[in-house]
Image: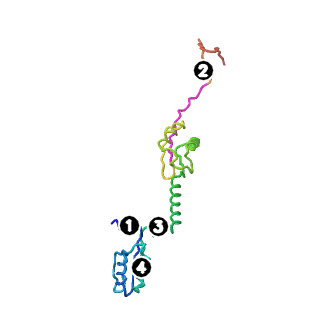
Amino acid sequence: MKNQWINLFAGTLRVKVTGKGIERFLNQLTRSGILIWNVKRHGTEAVTFQINVQDAKKLRVPARSSQCKIRFIERAGGPFFLRRIWTNSGFLVGAAAFLIILMFLSNMVWGIEIRGASPAIEHQIRKELADMGVKHGSLQFTIKNVDLLQRDLTDKVKEITWVGVELRGTTYHFQVVEKEEPEKQQAYTPQHLVAAKKATIVKMFVEEGESMRSEE
């Protein structure tokens, strides 16, 4: 298992050898100390096997003397993997940049919806939200969580009783309940008292001002 990992990192080649001197070729490899494995015969004049990358150049002399042809049919391992990565580095960089931009855009605020508020209160809420950093184009991770936004809005906008805050995707949704102000009682100014019928005033008691009467 250890040798397999070493071969994987160092790189391996799968070789196909054809010719009538295959037996002589394999014997020369063995005598030269070249390690081969996964040897498979394909008829009488073809064989495949695997070798380490560093032994590739050592096959030329035995191949010539045995009148065999060699062909590398498969490459595997660390060096070839790194070469493929380097060759496709432009694609990988582009893909990584696309993912980064996509994540960046998906974490921006693209919408703010406010419901239940009058135009004046909505304007005030949007102003407070802008001061808190909640505006179009802001990054979500720089903004307070929805619970803190709810608390701060309720504290700063005195005209609202409650506000619900929800973040769906890239849009903040605010549901507002405004305070119901009691109707102001009409203030009465000093007025004349006019009797509905003719009568005789027997006595008048005035706490402030001067008593006056008019006969018509």
- Which element type, helix, strand or loop, lies under badge 3? helix
Q: What span is in magenta?
A: 173-188
- Which element type, helix, strand or loop, lies under badge 4? helix
Residue 6 shows which numbered tag? 1
Relative to residue 136, is residue 62 drawn left or right?
A: left
Q: Are marks 2 and 1 in contact (CB under 8 Å)?
A: no
Q: Are marks 1 and 4 in contact (CB under 8 Å)?
A: no
Q: Residue 212: image x %, image y %?
A: 65, 15
Q: How much space separates mark 1 and mark 4, taking CA atoms? A: 21 Å
Q: How much space separates mark 3 and mark 4, taking CA atoms? A: 25 Å
Q: Please, is residue 46 above or below residue 123 in the view?
A: below
Amino acid type assigned to the residue bearing label 4 in the image? Leu
Q: Which residue is mark 3?
A: 82
Q: Residue 206: image x %, image y %?
A: 60, 14
Mark 3, other Cα within 10 Å: few <14 / some 14–19 / many ≥20: few
| Residue displayed at 48% across by 67% down | 85
| Sequence-earlier tag: 1 or 4 | 1
Q: Which residue is mark 4?
A: 59
Q: Residue 11: image x %, image y %?
A: 42, 70
182 or 128, which lies in front?
128
Amino acid type assigned to the residue bearing label 2 in the image? Ala
Relative to residue 128, is residue 57 drawn left or right?
A: left
Residue 179, magenta (yes or no)? yes
In what quadrant of the picture does the C terminus appear? top right
Q: How much space separates mark 3 and mark 2, taking CA atoms? A: 110 Å
Q: Which residue is mark 2?
A: 195
